[in-house]
Amino acid sequence: MGRLSNKVAIITGAAVGMGAEHARLFIEEGAKVIITDVNEKDGKTLAEELGDNAFFVSHDVSDEDSWEAVVAASVEKFGPVNVLVNNAGLSGPYAFTADLDPATYNKVVAVDQTGVFLGMRAVLPGMVAAGGGSIVNISSAAAMAHLSGTPNVAYTGAKAAVRGMTKATAIEYGPHNVRVNSVHPGAILTPMAKNLNDAETLDAIAQSLPIRRFADPREVSQVVLFLASDEASYMTGSELVVDGGRLAE
């Protein structure tokens, strides 16, 4: 028996990067996983790789109707959803506040903040009816301390909002045995990180951290797995930081 046996999990933004690692680990631990993403090609490929206990749904997390379709498809395929991992997110744009176009700001907030709200809103009634569940919201270490030198008010603000939303929802739904926690990754070696930085920059970032390296995405997935599992049955409203010690300095 795996640590997530009898769990049905929706993982957003799961076609590549951290989300894909979450999906792989959840499958290994016995869950049935609904992979969602706007990236249909990689999402379908991953679902095929993971086998019969995974399937892909094309999904824009900022769209309310899209959320209703995902939950309906999940229930039809595997049964009631008892785990949600709000992983989908946009990084950037790197611009100072006065230089940031409002439309671009709103696009980041729509995915990184509103998408989390819509996800929680979509699954909560079913979790309450089923007697409980676990929601894991992927925020960022930036929600606690903005990294100087990388102007990013939209991302930092949205991720900070996720931190607060997590606590508010945890308090609201604790009496219904629905746990809501947040994970705050720091420097994670994802395809996005590689695309945004050259090797020299990546090395400089790594050397600035107490642990002196980037995290492998699976090191974040292990934390997400713990919060999704019954091992974290008395944890709600918590925030777990996975940042190589950056915030300790």
Image (cartoon, rainbow, N blue to C red):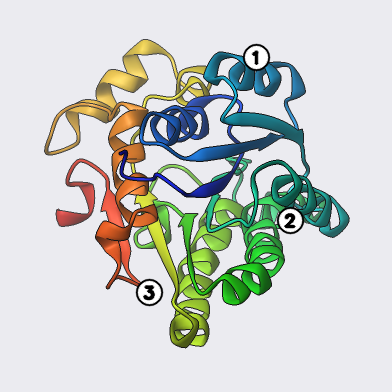
Q: Which residue has dot 1 on it?
A: 45
Q: CA distance from mark 2 to mark 3?
A: 23 Å
Residue 130: image location, x then y, percent: 57, 70
Q: Which residue has dot 2 on it?
A: 110
Q: Given contact means CB atoms under 8 Å apart, are the residues at marks 1 and 3 in contact?
A: no
Is residue 146 something one can see in this rendering? no
Which image quadrant for residue 46?
top right
Nearest the eye: 36 or 138: 36
Sooner in the amino-acid sequence: mark 2 or mark 1: 1
Q: Which mark is residue 118?
A: none
The residue lying at 29 percent from left, 40 percent from top is 222
- Residue type, numbered disc 1: Thr
Q: CA distance from mark 2 to mark 1?
A: 26 Å
Q: Secondary structure at mark 1?
A: helix
- Residue type, numbered disc 2: Ala
Residue 95: image location, x then y, percent: 61, 44
Indicate left or right for 246 with 76 as reference.
left
Nearest the eye: 61 or 31: 31
Q: Secondary structure at mark 2?
A: helix
Q: CA distance from mark 1 to mark 3?
A: 34 Å
Q: Residues within 10 Å of mark 1 (few under 14, many from 20)?
A: few
Q: Nearer the viewer, mark 1 or mark 3?
A: 1
Sooner in the amino-acid sequence: mark 1 or mark 3: 1
Which image quadrant for residue 4?
top left
Q: Which mark is residue 237?
A: 3
Q: Nearer the viewer, mark 2 or mark 1?
A: 1
